[in-house]
Every structure is written in C-alpha cells, then in structure tokens.
Image (spheres, rainbow, N blue to C red):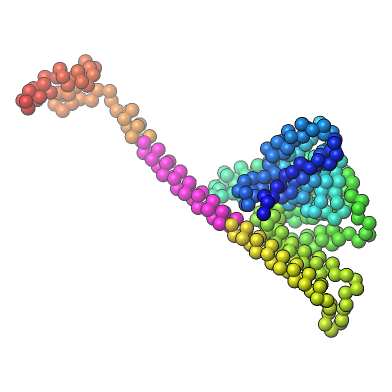
Amino acid sequence: MPNREFLNIVPVTANKARIEIDGTIGGFDWDEWKYKNTGTDIRAKLKELEKLPVSEIEVLITSLGGYVDDALQIHDALKEHPAKVTTIVQGFCASAATVIACAGDRRIISPNALFLIHKCMNSVYDANENALEETLEQQRTVNEVVLNVYKEVLKKDEAELNALFAANNGKGKWITAEDALAFGFATEIQEFDTDEKKPATAMARFLNHARALFPEMNTNQIINQNPAVMKKFLLSFAMLGALLALKDDTEYDEKTGVLLNPEQLQKMEDKLKAFADLEAKFSQKESDLQKANEDLAAANTSIAEKDTLIATLTAERDNYKAKYENAPANVPGVNGKDVNVNEESVEDYVKNSPVYKKTFEENL
C-alpha cells in the first residue's frame, strides 16, 4: 500500500499550482511515525514553487484541525507569498484548519462542506496551581490571536463572531457553507450543486445535536484533536448515506420494508464489510494512541521522580558545600601541634613539622 501523502503539489496549468492539505494540521502520521502538514512542510512546498512560473496557488483543505502553531505558520506563509492564493474548503474544515482557510485572497467553500471554529484546547499533565494559571493565560492569548485572523475576513459584527467562537462551552458548532459565506470565512460557494436541497444543512444540525447529547464528543480526544475517533463516529453517517443512495425504483412493502435485489444486496454487504474493516482500523489506531498516552504519562511520572531525587541531592551537596566554605581558615590542632602558622603547602608542612618528622623516624 503506497504511503499516504498529507500535503501535495499538483500542477493545474502553466501558471497555477494546487497545494492539497489533507489530514491533521501538524498531526502525527501513525503509518510513517512522523509529523505532517507542519509549517516547515508548507514552506518547503512553497520553495518548490519558486522553480515554476506560478502566479496563482490553490490550496485545497480537508482537515478536522490540529495544532494552532502550525496553522498560523501556514497562514502567514501563504499570506506573504507573492502569488494570488485561493483557498478551497471541501468536506470538513474545523479548528486550526479554518485559520489556513482564511489565508486566501479568494476563499471558496463547497456547498456540501461544514465549517467549525472554537476556542483553543490544551492538555496539562502533572500541573500545579502556577502551571494551570500560566496555561490559562496562554490559551487566552492564543484565542485572541486566532480571533484576529478571523476578524481580517469578518463581514458580521464581532459580537456574532465571539458568540460563534464561544458556542457550546467554547467547543464551537458546525456551520454550513451559507453561514461561512455570511461570516466572511468564504468569499463564494462553488456552483456545481444545482440541487435545492442542501444535505450539509441537515448534517450540520445533526452533528451539533449529537455534540449536545454526547458531552464526551467535546473532549480534546475527538473531533479536531483526534480525527480517527471522529471518523469512526461518522461511519454511521456513511452507512446512512449508503442506504439513502438506493434508487427511487427500489421496491418497498409496508410489511417487509425495502426489497433488495441480489445485486443491491451484494453491494450493501460489500459496504458493510468495508465499514467493518474501517472500524477495526480506527479501533486499532485508537488503541495505539491510548497506549502512547499511557507511556507518556509513565514517562512524565519517572521524570518527576528523578527531578525530586536531583533536587534532594542538590540540596545535600549545597549543605555540605556551605559547611566547608564557612569553616575557619586556621583550625587549632590537638594540643596545638597541628597549627600551620606559616601557610605552607600540606606537603612542606608535613615534611618540616618536627612532630610528623619524629613520628616518621620512629616508625622506620
């Protein structure tokens, strides 16, 4: 199976190139054991474009978010590039990925896409009161920086932006392409959808309803922070879509329900098997992530124990050092015989001392 590339450059025309960002921003690829979609990655890709006569760059974004640091780096790298930048949002665009979406001079969103902004999240291990206060202050600063990015494209009042940002206890809520356009996150909606019914609207409502019903969906272990778990949750929607994809001429009986012909039944069984395989894969990834978190917690505990030991040994060393440094320069010897009045070296003092000399001769 070929390695999955998160960030690619695809030539479109002689003067246009497309950068495709797929997956977690700054996320860890468990298949290749390395971080991808980082600020370093995007700068390297933009460096490659310097070799081409590119005057326009399209950035296709499909991501549930990730690390704000990398998202801000990517946003700034795109903003400072001399080429005209067009961001195109398709599928789900959430959290840190929305920061990148705002970097486009032209910002396109699919009519079937969903958009989510929220307050930043963080995990704190073995934190005392001071560490918690410091983390809280950092989060407030990051929130302010992210809001400033949104304000650069904002069409509505800041109060409405702040309300959306703080919705659902700071976890945000999904909005449709029309909402993203109204806020200014997008400048236009792709026109390939001619159907008056907007499935994304129903999907957004259902997702927000599910987030309210299941608080565990709002933890830092799902949605934009853990795409694997989110995708596992969305398998049910994929199955629903497969069922709704049946042709209009499918037979229906009030007593027996939908009657599938052998070909339709086989397709449905194939889809069920594919979904089962995906669920098993995501379950394994989730298990691997849990094991990694447990190993990290154990490592942090070991580090804390070693830090305590080092602090104890350091205190003992400093105590002995203080006693040594505070000792008097000339300490009288027993019966006044060991006083080095001439400040000679130890070697000369022992050699010339009549007491030590006599003792030495008596023992020859």
Can you see residue 355? Answer: no
Q: Is residue 179 left or right of residue 130?
A: right
Residue shown at 17% from the left, 24% from the top: 338
Q: Which sits in the foreground, 123 or 136?
A: 123
Find residue 116 and report its horizontal and vertical position in percent.
Answer: 78, 52
Residue 81, picture quadrant: top right
Find residue 5 and report its horizontal and vertical position in percent.
Answer: 70, 47
Residue shown at 88% from the left, 44% from the top: 187
Q: Is residue 44 left or right of residue 54?
A: left
Can you see residue 233? Answer: yes
Q: Is residue 314 left or right of residue 12?
A: left
Mark count? 0
Q: Which sits in the foreground, 327 or 251?
A: 251
Quadrant (top left/top right/bottom left/bottom right) for the N terminus = bottom right
Q: Which sits in the foreground, 312 or 66?
A: 66
Q: Which residues are magenta?
A: 289-317
Find residue 132 and report its horizontal and vertical position in percent.
Answer: 60, 46
In reply to whether residue 166 is colored magenta, the answer given is no
Magenta part, dominant SS: helix
Find residue 122 and report its horizontal and vertical position in percent.
Answer: 64, 48
Tell me: residue 334, above or below residue 239: above
Tell me: residue 39, above or below residue 275: above
Q: Is residue 272 left or right of residue 127?
A: right
Residue shown at 45% from the left, 48% from the top: 305
Tell me: residue 349, above or below residue 89: above
Tell me: residue 252, above or below residue 47: below
Residue shown at 81% from the left, 65% from the top: 241
Residue 289, picture quadrant: bottom right
**Residue farthest to the top?**
342
Quadrant (top left/top right/bottom left/bottom right) for the C terminus = top left
In reply to whether residue 291 is colored magenta, the answer given is yes
